[in-house]
Amino acid sequence: MTAHPEDQTETDQAEAAPKFRRRKEARPDEILDAALDLFAEKGFDRTRVDDIARRAGVSKGAVYLYFPSKDAVIEALVHRAVGHFVGNMADHITAWRGDPRPLLTQLVPLFVERVSDPRVFGVPKLIIREAPSHPKLADLYREQVIGTAFPALIALFSQAVEGGYIRKIDPEMAVRCLLGPFLMHVMLEDVFGIRPSGAAPGDLKFATLLDTHLSIFFAGLDPEPSPAPSSQKDTSHG
């Protein structure tokens, strides 16, 4: 079937139209995706708003329409990646009473699914890489993520200790032990280039890591056994 010249002209115009005209509702996400890619490639300092606009296929003015500064862009990236997720998880954790292990087991698949999204996983990697030279980024992540998750997890372990569901441990240190392997796992790959053996590109085997880590961590939470009743020696005669 032969296309009419006017039909071809309309097609060419549609293909040539800037992204921000074709998908207005997707504009903020396209800008954030472009920014995340550029921050990973060039670093936060070397990425200009012009670069973000060009990569997203929008004008510089369109970027500023949604994000008044480059700091606002990265703040939006953090919020999009983990803001709502961490808030919802903190609500579930805070409401829990009893042994924390069943709850943590329920949350693992949700966490793995979340960090499997490159747009999500790219944010903590970016923060780890940039935080030493940009303390404001570390402050931002601490405020929006760590400052929400840490208190909820500390309270979770505190009530479990008080209720006798787990052994008497320091709740704050327990949280650090719980989260530490994940951070080290990310750093080994992102900073030192040490990937899990046999992992495909882009796959850090988070499910395997967490399954291994929690099986060891949970065993260490078992309450200490009650002391056995002391047997009294029979000293009676006769």
Image (spheres, rainbow, N blue to C red):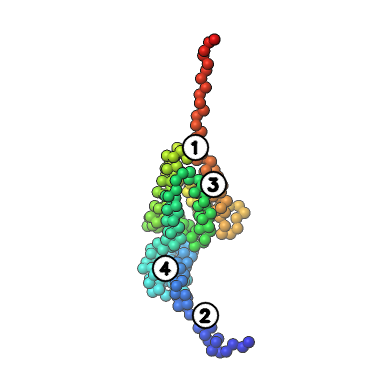
Residue 45 visible: no
Instruction: Determine whether 62 is above or below 145 in the image.
Output: below
Element type at mark 2: helix
Q: Which residue carries the number 3 mark?
A: 213
Which class describes the residues within 10 Å of circle 1: few (<14), some (14-19), or many (20+)? Answer: some
In the figure, 132 relative to 59: above or below?
above
Identify which residue is drawn at 54% across, 46% down: 213
- The mark nearer the N terminus, 4 or 1, is 4
Which residue is identified by label 1? 223
The residue beneath circle 4 is 48
**Of the residues under marks 2 and 4, which one precedes in the sequence?**
2
Q: Which numbered disc, 2 or 3, marks the residue closer to the eye?
A: 3
Mark 4 or 1, closer to the camera: 1
State the residue position of label 2: 15
Is residue 73 toward the left or the right of residue 182 in the image? Answer: left
Q: Real-space Cα distance between discs 2 and 3?
A: 49 Å
Spatial separation of the CA atoms under disc 1 and disc 2: 65 Å
Which of marks 2 and 1 precedes in the sequence? 2
Q: Residue furthest right?
A: 1
Q: Residue flagged by tag 2: what amino acid is it?
A: Glu
- Circle 2/circle 3 CB separation < 8 Å: no
What x and y, as percent, mark residue 115?
51, 57
